[in-house]
Image (cartoon, helix red, strand yellow):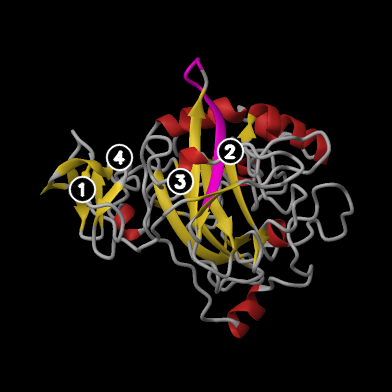
């Protein structure tokens, strides 16, 4: 990730949603476009500003937005589970599971949609708030940001791990960072009564009680329901956006703006920041870069992940380990071919990178694995 040129009021997001892989092309006869042309999107806000839903134009009852010429709200919304891997600018970040009672994309109607666009935020089938872990909101204001422990002025690698319990259910979502040759465990929560540095059902329960927030997470099935969504196919989404509804204050400032309760401080940005018209006029060249996207077994995607304490002591706030990492950019590919790179006992371990354009690490793989070309930038031991 590179969010160095993404300030207050902006959000560079990478996340998964349970939309149809083809954008509804096969399911709805009125959909002749498909995902390639932008149809089929859904998320846990059950957005009603989507122009085409279930193969039909969402024009009935369309209400234009008062502050966005390109937006508004129609009669229908489109809902599905959402797993936010990364919502961030250079001031604050969060990762958040948003379960829905129904798995897969569903259409909702009017205020029954809930979410951002309805009078009753919690009326729909999805949890619009989710159980977010934002280090700043959890009391550690020195962990993430410009020049901080995780320095948002530089490129960084973000690792998210999904762990199951003995019953095979999603039980924990862990976060690590890699930067400047170090693996950095997520910061510990410093909120009284909410220990830990990862998202679990118990942590979410303690957090909602400490913040006295509305507990829609459990109403919509909690971690177990999020796990059911993750077991099914999901679609990767990358975006950069500003927020015409609440100026992104829920991510990087105090929100609600007049609140003094625990959990309302989410980032250091001013409560007057984030106005889309001002951002678009003043910093039109803002950008985010996503690169080197990988997935695989636990501790396989970045070297050294297994060598850092995943649960640093509460008094220290963070744990780090020095390793050699790579942050070279790659392009996605839908094909995999084998490269007959020799195997040896001193090469890279299974699942680790073993070559590619710009790669300066180990070449070749430990026996019996083979260095396989994923694309010209990334070769992996398989």
Disc 3 vs disc 4: which is toward the camera? 4
Q: How far apart are labels 1 and 4 at the CA level?
A: 9 Å
The residue furthest top is 167
The residue furthest front is 346
Q: How far apart are labels 2 and 3 at the CA level?
A: 27 Å
Residue labelled with disc 3: 16
Residue 307 visible somewhere in the drawing: yes
Q: How far apart are labels 3 and 4 at the CA level?
A: 28 Å
Q: Earlier in the sequence, mark 3 or mark 1?
A: 3
Residue 364: which numbered mark, if any?
A: 1
Q: How far apart are labels 1 and 2 at the CA level?
A: 28 Å
Q: Which residues are magenta?
A: 166-177
In the drawing, does residue 265 fall left or right of residue 126? right
Residue located at (53% from left, 32% from top): 226
In the drawing, does residue 302 fall left or right of residue 195? left
**Decide: marks 3, 1 in contact (CB < 8 A)?**
no
Disc 2 crowd rating (10 Å Cα; few below 14, some 14-19, many 20+) is some
Residue at disc 4, secondary structure? loop
Q: How far apart are labels 2 and 4 at the CA level?
A: 21 Å
**Decide: marks 3, 4 in contact (CB < 8 A)?**
no
**Decide: marks 1, 2 in contact (CB < 8 A)?**
no
Placement of 341 over or under 146, stated as above or below: above
Residue labelled with disc 2: 309
Q: How far apart are labels 3 and 1 at the CA level?
A: 32 Å
Residue 326 on image: x %, y %: 38, 58
């Amino acid at each position: 990730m590179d969010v160095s040129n993404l300030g207050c009021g902006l959000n560079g997001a990478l996340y998964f949603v349970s939309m149809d892989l083809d954008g509804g092309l096969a399911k709805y006869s009125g959909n002749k476009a498909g995902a390639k042309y932008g149809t089929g999107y859904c998320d846990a806000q059950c957005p009603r500003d989507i122009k085409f839903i279930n193969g039909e134009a969402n024009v009935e009852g369309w209400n234009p937005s008062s502050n966005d010429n390109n937006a508004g709200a129609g009669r229908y919304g489109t809902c599905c589970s959402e797993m936010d891997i990364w919502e961030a600018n250079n001031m604050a970040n969060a990762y958040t599971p948003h379960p829905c009672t129904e798995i897969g994309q569903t259409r909702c109607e009017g205020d029954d949609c809930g979410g951002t666009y309805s009078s009753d935020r919690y009326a729909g089938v999805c949890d619009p708030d989710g159980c977010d872990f934002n280090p700043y909101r959890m009391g550690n204001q020195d962990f993430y940001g410009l020049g901080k422990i995780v320095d948002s002025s530089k490129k960084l690698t973000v690792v998210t791990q999904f762990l199951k319990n003995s019953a095979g259910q999603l039980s924990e979502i862990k976060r690590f960072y890699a930067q400047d040759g170090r693996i950095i465990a997520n910061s510990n929560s410093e909120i009284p009564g909410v220990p830990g540095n990862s998202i679990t059902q118990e942590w979410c329960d303690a957090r909602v009680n400490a913040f006295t927030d509305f507990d829609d997470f459990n109403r919509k099935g909690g971690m177990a329901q999020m796990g059911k969504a993750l077991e099914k196919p999901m679609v990767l989404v990358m975006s950069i956006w500003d927020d015409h509804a609440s100026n992104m204050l829920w991510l990087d400032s105090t929100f609600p703006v007049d609140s003094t309760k625990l959990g309302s401080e989410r980032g250091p940005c001013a409560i007057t920041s984030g106005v889309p018209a001002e951002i678009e006029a003043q910093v039109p060249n803002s950008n985010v870069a996503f690169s080197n996207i990988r997935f695989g077994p636990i501790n396989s995607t970045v070297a050294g992940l297994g060598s850092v304490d995943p649960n640093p002591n509460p008094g220290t706030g963070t744990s780090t380990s020095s390793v050699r990492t790579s942050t070279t950019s790659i392009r996605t590919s839908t094909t995999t071919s084998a490269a007959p790179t020799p195997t040896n006992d001193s090469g890279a371990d299974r699942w680790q990178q073993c070559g590619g354009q710009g790669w300066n690490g180990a070449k070749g793989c430990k026996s019996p694995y083979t260095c396989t070309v994923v694309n010209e930038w990334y070769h992996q031991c398989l």
